[in-house]
Image (cartoon, rainbow, N blue to C red):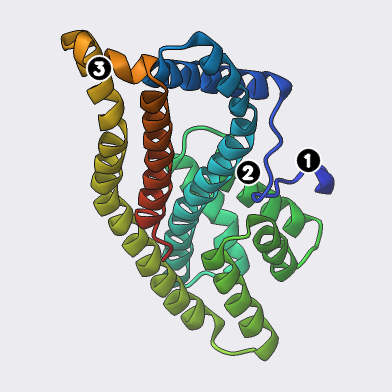
Amino acid sequence: MLEKDLTDYSEYHMTIKEKILYTFLAMIVIFVIVFIFYHKISISLILCTTALIYPKIKRKEIIEKRKYSLNLQFKDMLYSLSSSLNAGKSVELSFREIHQDLSVIYIDPNTDILIETQVILRKLKMNETIESALTDFSNRAHIEDITNFVDVFNICKRTGGNIIEIIKNTSNIINDKIEKKEEINIILSERKLEQKILTSLPVFMVILLTFTVPEYIAPVFKDSKGIVAMTVSIVFLLIAYVISKKIVSIIV
């Protein structure tokens, strides 16, 4: 793998096929929701064009999800590193064994952390220092926990302190922090489900009224005041969705 081919985890380039797929799926969802609120195909088709911005939103979600997964994988790497250091092995030798340990945990050879450990080992074989290999990984990962670990590691290497003990302590602190993040995400998963249910509830209410008491809700779709009311409802629904999404998105 060439240097230019290494992954920058803050970037994700969608293929044309992915852009078309995500845009098409967003168009379907927008068309259905708008038709439920207006019962007018023309308005639904016009508002479908807003689906063109969805690939950008999806790209951001993919990047966040990938970085979150890499952070969890990095935790396993630190566990392996700490175990090797506790066994009395040198830092360089410990990194040579990390890939084998992680290969047992992650079966897929395309797992990000397996690829990164392979890159580090390859750089070590080319007589690059472990500091430069880890710094390159940190610069591409753009993850705070990885950056903090690499900074401490590089400082220890330069100052000549008790690097093994310091790395073990740093690894334990970062592992604890990552575990706390996982616990918070587990707690928030319930709240995120509630948020999705509450956001979709007005849509289901309109569907229910449309099929159970059509004569009651019919004026809303035909009268100009009803259309204005529906538009205001959609605007408030979108605002509520954005606010609730920010509430359940906690950065540790």
Question: Residue type at mark 2?
Answer: Ile
In this view of the protein, which residue sits in the foreground, 165 or 249? 249
Discs 3/2, front: 3
- On screen, residue 132 versus residue 38, left or right, reads right
Task: Identify residue type, mark 3.
Answer: Ile
Residue 190 locus on image (x, y percent): 23, 45
Which residue shows up at 54% across the image and 87% down it? Answer: 162
Q: Are marks 2 and 1 in contact (CB under 8 Å)?
A: yes
**In this view of the protein, which residue sits in the foreground, 100 or 115?**
115
**Residue under numbered circle 3:** 217
Of the numbered discs 3 and 2, the one sitting upstream in the chain is 2
Residue under numbered circle 2: 115
3D distance between C-alphas at marks 3 and 1 = 62 Å
What residue is drawn where x is 21% and y is 9%? 215
Is 208 in front, or is 178? 208
Q: Position of residue 60 (x, y in %)?
A: 58, 43
In this view, which residue lies farthest toward the left? 212
Local SS, label 2: helix
